[in-house]
Each structure stands twice: as structure tokens, then as C-alpha cells.
Amino acid sequence: MTLRVLLEEALGVSRNITGTVTGVAQDSRKVKRGFIFVARPGLKIDGHAFVETAVKQGAIAVVGERSEREMAGLPYIQVSNAKAAVAQLAAAFYHYPAESFINFGVTGTDGKTTTSFILHHLLNQHFKTALMSTAAIRIGKNNLELEGHFTTPEAPEVQALLARFRESNCSHAVLETSSHGFAQHRLDEISYHVGVWTNLTPEHLDFHESFEAYREAKLELMRRSKIAILNRDDPNFNHFAQAASSVISYGLSDRADWQAKYVRAVADRQLFSLYLNRRGQNERYEVMLPMVGHYNIHNALAAMAAAYQAGIKMPDIIKGLQSFPGVAGRMQVVQAEPFKVIVDFAHTPPALEKALDTLRPITPGRLIVMIGAAGERDPIKRPSLGKISQTHADIAIFTEEDSRSENIVTILIDIANGAIHAGGNATQTYWTIPDRRKAMRLAIGLAQPGDTVLLAGKGHERSLERGYETIPWDEVAEAQAILENRAAKEGKA
């Protein structure tokens, strides 16, 4: 596409300038010859500081919010919102790939990934379906490589992925959508047939600054969806219902359109009766969910209700749910006997509490949890993590979880203060171990037959951000190595 045509189509800007565009980037390190570089303002650094780098990399034009007509010898195009311009340019460059699918968006504080995976599984039984999630990117059943810890990639990467989905002839797409994604315009130029909301608790307040602003970012999915699938049991239901044009509710409440009743936990699965209240009729179905955790009933209901909107019949939805293989890093059992070791992504206070409450009834011995808190993120939640660890587990080990440039000792003190206020005692009910591998050794080393060890916070992620470096990390593999080493030592003894 020529530069002149792209600017006219994406931004409505008419400039008599030449050149062939080969890509769009807002990161100067990703600029290649023929790229448009969008110099957008960041939280700490203005993208204009990297224009010279972008020029050396081969940029042919710069887009930003200043009034210049030229910068570093390149055409400069002024826009009112550079963040929005990134998405507009990328969508136009890839010829608006989102228009090729029936899009399902999934948002919420907790449960987004599990709900997205269940929905993708159900849809993929009948349609070639793509998945963009924090835990995996899939085309049909095939996984693509995933980089970083973002739920929603930046706008150029989002549009590039959508274009790849289109090239693979996908007809449906499940897009896990974050509050950051909406607030930073990463998801602009995407319309949704169905928007799913799981729940809402305080999170990312370091970025959004208030719970109301955080909720407002989540509400954007409801405004842009033809149909909204909403959690009737969450206190924020009315806010989301008011933002939606058409609402289908789910939950345990008698007022839910999709209601689960008579939930029974049996070994590694759950059974429940589904009451489908629609068109004045009340239909009942018996459902088996091959997952532990009462909270996963909500995730399953949301996914089932969304799949139904795709035209899948109820018997096929129920049958498809029975074969759901689970999500890596979500209540993943690493060892079952003689003591359980489970890896889970729970990193918010509500998610940690749910995970521990799920494991308590199936733990005859002690419940041991290892948990940390991310640096440069939501310091307000750290004491709550410590308190919940103290009150819902028998032993807690506090450690690193992507400490980034923040002092890990400061983070651990914040968490430990929550445990202390809940009656915790250092080296008796809790330990602070900065190194995650050493902390894991202690957690597993303390375990006895009948105990359960919950390794929380990292889940599926494949890297650990420590200081200013990013190191490879595989929580499950680390746990398996420690278990094998322990078994070898006990065998020799």
C-alpha cells in the first residue's frame, strides 16, 4: 500500500507524499525499511525521543501529536490521538482483518483465560476458530508462539495476528480482552458479535488510578458488542447491563438466564443442573464440567452461553464441555501423591482466595501456598495477598513474581505486613524468600503426605522479570525438577 493511500484511508489525511508502506510500529526497535513510525506518548517516555532510531531503521514517515510538517528529514503527520492512530493505521495496512470473523470478546478481572479457552474449545468443535489469549494463541488446535505477559498485544501485533487468522480461513475468533487493551486503543477497529464479562474486583489501579476508571475500560467491550453475556452474581452487573444493548445473564442467581443449580464436586470434576430461562420457558440440562473449583462453574456458564449464540445446539455444547482438556497453569496438577503440588495463575486477592478455598476440602493435611506480587504494579493488593495466605492456608512462602526494577525486599515486606496483621509469625506460619526457585524448594520440602502445595502467581508464563532482565521460567518444569530431586534423595536414604 502506498503511503498516500494508507494515510487517506486510515487517518483521513491528504498529503501528496510518495513511498510504499511495509508496516506500522510504535516501537522504534521493531521498525524496518518502509515502516510508518508512530511516536506516541508513553507513561514515562515520549516516542519522539526515538525518531532518529526509527529513521536509521528505515522508517519513511512519522506520525505524532505535534504540529511539525517534517521531522528528522521525514514527512510528519499530526494526529489528535497517536494511540488511536496506531490501531487505525495497522488495521488499514492489513485491510481490516477483524471484519472477516464472528468475534467473541472476553473481559473481567479473573476467569478471562479459562472462559476464553472453554469457549474456543466449544466453537472449534464446529468452526475453525482462532484464540488470542494471555496463555496461548491458537489457530484451530495449533498453538503459535506467545511473547511477553500481556493479555492484549499492542495494536500492530493484534492486527497482524488477525490477518494471520484470516489467512488460515478462520470463521470465528475468541479474543481475551484486557482493560489496558481498551484504554490504550490496542483493540480499536474491532467489532464484537458477543462480549463476555466474568467479574470485576480492584486490579491494575496503578494504571487506571481508580476502580471506576478500571470498570469504565471494561465497559467498552459491552458498548461494542451486539450481545453481552454478563455475570448476574457480580455486584457490578447493573453497570455492565446498562452499557449493553442486549443482555444474557448467567450465574447461580434465580434471576440468571443461564442458571446453575445443585452443584456437586466429584473427584476431579463437577456436576450441576443447568436451567435455561428463555422465551418464557425453563429448560433443564444435566452438565458435567471436568474441572475443579466452584468458580469454574461461572466460567463454564459464560462460555456455554456465548457458544449458544454461535448457533451450537445445547446437546453439542454439553458434549463438548465434557471433553475440555483444561488450561495449562490453571489448577494444573503436577503431582497428586503422596502430597499434591498444583500450579495456578492466581495473582489477585480474590483469585488466590478462591484457589485456596477450592483446595482446602480436598486436602486432608496442611495447605501450603507460595505467592508473590509483581513489582511496579498494584502495591495496594500486597497486604491482602499476605492476609489471605495467612487466613486460608497453614503455611505461606512469600517470594518474587516479576519484581522488575522494584526492590524485592520492599514487595515482600508489604505482603508480610498483611500476614502479620492477620496473626502470622515469621518462620512459623510464613517465610519470605526472595528467590522464587529457593522458595519453591522450601514449599515442596516442607510438604508431607496428605498436604497440598499451591504454587501461585506465574501459571503458564514462560519468563520471570527480575530487575532489568527477563529470564526463562517454567513453573511446572521447576516444580517437577524439585520433586524429582527430593524423590532421589529420599530413595537413597
Image (cartoon, grey):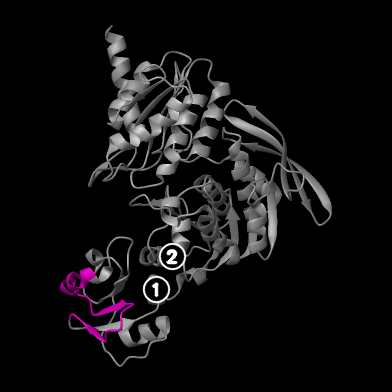
Q: Secondary structure at mark 2?
A: helix
Q: CA distance from mark 2 to mark 1?
A: 9 Å
Q: Position of residue 117 (x, y in %)?
A: 51, 48
Residues under numbered marks 2 and 1 in contact, where contact means CB atoms less than 8 Å apart: yes
Q: Quadrant of the C terminus?
A: top left
Q: Residues within 10 Å of mark 1 (few under 14, many from 20)?
A: some
Amino acid type shown at disc 1: Tyr
Q: Position of residue 233 (x, y in %)?
A: 67, 45
Q: Is residue 161 visible?
A: yes
Please indicate whether residue 427 sits to the left or right of residue 323 in the image. left
User: What is the span of residues highlighted in magenta in the rendered image?
Assistant: 49-72
- Name the mark on residue 170: none
- Name the mark on residue 94: 1
Q: How many marks?
A: 2
Residue 205 in the image: above or below residue 323: below
Amino acid type shown at disc 2: Leu
Q: Which residue does the image show at 45% across and 56% down from the upper left?
A: 208
Q: Of 31 and 64, which appears nearest the observer?
A: 64
Which image quadrant for residue 153? bottom left
Q: Is residue 310 visible?
A: no
Q: Secondary structure at mark 1?
A: loop
Q: Which residue does the image show at 42% across and 13% down from the upper left?
A: 448
Residue 2 in the image: above or below residue 168: below
Q: Which residue is mark 2?
A: 162
Q: Position of residue 395 (x, y in %)?
A: 43, 21
